[in-house]
Image (cartoon, rainbow, N blue to C red):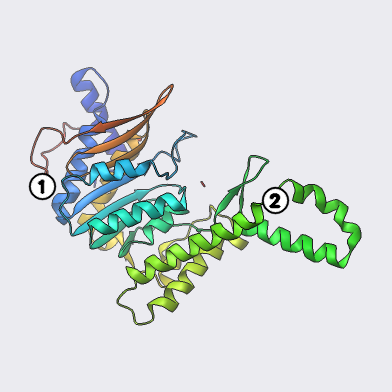
Amino acid sequence: MPTWGDILQELLATAAATGGQPDFDAVRRKYVRALHALTGRDTILYYTDWMGGGKPGTSIVLGDMQGIMEVNIGLRGPGLDLILHSPGGSAEAAASIVRYLRTKFDNIRVFVPLAAMSAATMWALAGDEIVMGKHSQLGPIDPQMLTPDGQYHPASAILRQFERAKDEISGQASLLGAWVPILQGYGPSLLAECERAELLARSLVEEWLASYMLRADRRRKSKANAIAKWFSEYGASQSHALGIDRIQARDHGLKIADLEADQALQDAVLSVHHATILTLSGTASKIVENHLGRAWVQMVQVMQQVVLQGPPAGPPPGALPGPGPGPKQN
């Protein structure tokens, strides 16, 4: 398997051959085609540069639907392999994307080569199966609320603080003065918004698990409820950013396959991952792409722009490429 360093050298060789910039697109698409040739399944990757140092526009938003629709052109189904790398974002946007993909595909296998957190975890939980490596992680789905101080705080923590304030003030009225400045900073509707956000995240995951991953299980409803509750409460006593590995996920009832169980598949998926991460070391902040080479790319320059790319000329999408020219939360 080519490592991150091997693919970097391959990219540098493309730059040396032309005297220009590395050909990120050609190298990345070569590995995406190779993955498709191995599995025979439609393949889509959704990647954002959320670990690269603060680029804007890395969250899941409803605008991503345009990219998802674009890369569905030419796909035949009924199975889809989705390679997902995201910090999360809008639960409502994730729900819209899940609903759309489920009208297109009967079976969705979700690969998490490194991390799919928060709303991206919700998206992954809408799959029929999740494939994770030893190093891969999901995350809690407890919503993070933007408060007037400009910071994100867990909805569950805000709700617990309201309960604590109520208990302390009812037991000792003199504490009201200490709590008033804190509670005033939250705004009048925040409590209701926290309750709604928690209910939405949990109910969506519960519905998706029962409908897809657990649909053959006679106890699917009760199991889906328990899993959704655990994922939504995991962050209550621990960090929202603390990952959930495949052992924890499997122990709580998820259908998780080990990426290492199939060496050829592991090599193909991680090659796509490395090539895409290296692509994001440039000006791209988000890439949505299929195995046909059709892509929706969000660039970060002075202004953000989206670049649509149709399938490139070259070998047929199902064919294995030849060797390269040698040796980038909420």
> Residue lying furthest top in this view?
19
In this view, the residue in front, 247 or 214, is 214
Question: Is disc 1 surrounded by few (<14), some (14 to 19) or many (20+) residues within 10 Å?
Answer: some
**Callout 2 secondary element:** loop
Observer-side mark, 1 or 2, equals 2
Tell me what residue is drawn at x 72 percent, y 59 percent: 162
Please give the residue where the numbered disc 1 appears in the rendered image.
318
Which of the 4 quarters of the picture holds residue 48? top left
Mark 1: which amino acid?
A: Gly
Q: Is residue 178 left or right of residue 260?
A: right
Figure check: 237 above or below 282: below
Which of the 4 quarters of the picture holds residue 100? bottom left
Tell me where residue 98 appears, x and y as whole percent.
34, 56
Tell me what residue is drawn at x 16 percent, y 31 percent: 325
In this view, the residue in front, 271 or 330, is 330
Circle number at residue 158: none
Tell me where residue 219 appears, x and y as whole percent.
39, 81
Figure check: 17 above or below 226: above
Tell me where residue 128 appears, x and y as whole percent.
30, 65
Tell me what residue is drawn at x 16 percent, y 46 percent: 34
Regarding residue 252, the answer to whether it shows in the image is: no
Mark 2: which amino acid?
A: Pro
Q: Are marks 1 and 2 in contact (CB under 8 Å)?
A: no
**Callout 1 secondary element:** loop
Which of the 4 quarters of the picture holds residue 328? top left
Q: Is residue 139 left or right of residue 47?
A: right
Q: Which of marks 1 and 2 is nearer the N terminus?
A: 2
Please give the residue where the numbered disc 2 appears in the rendered image.
188
Tell me what residue is drawn at x 22 percent, y 21 percent: 16
Regarding residue 22, the answer to whether it shows in the image is: yes
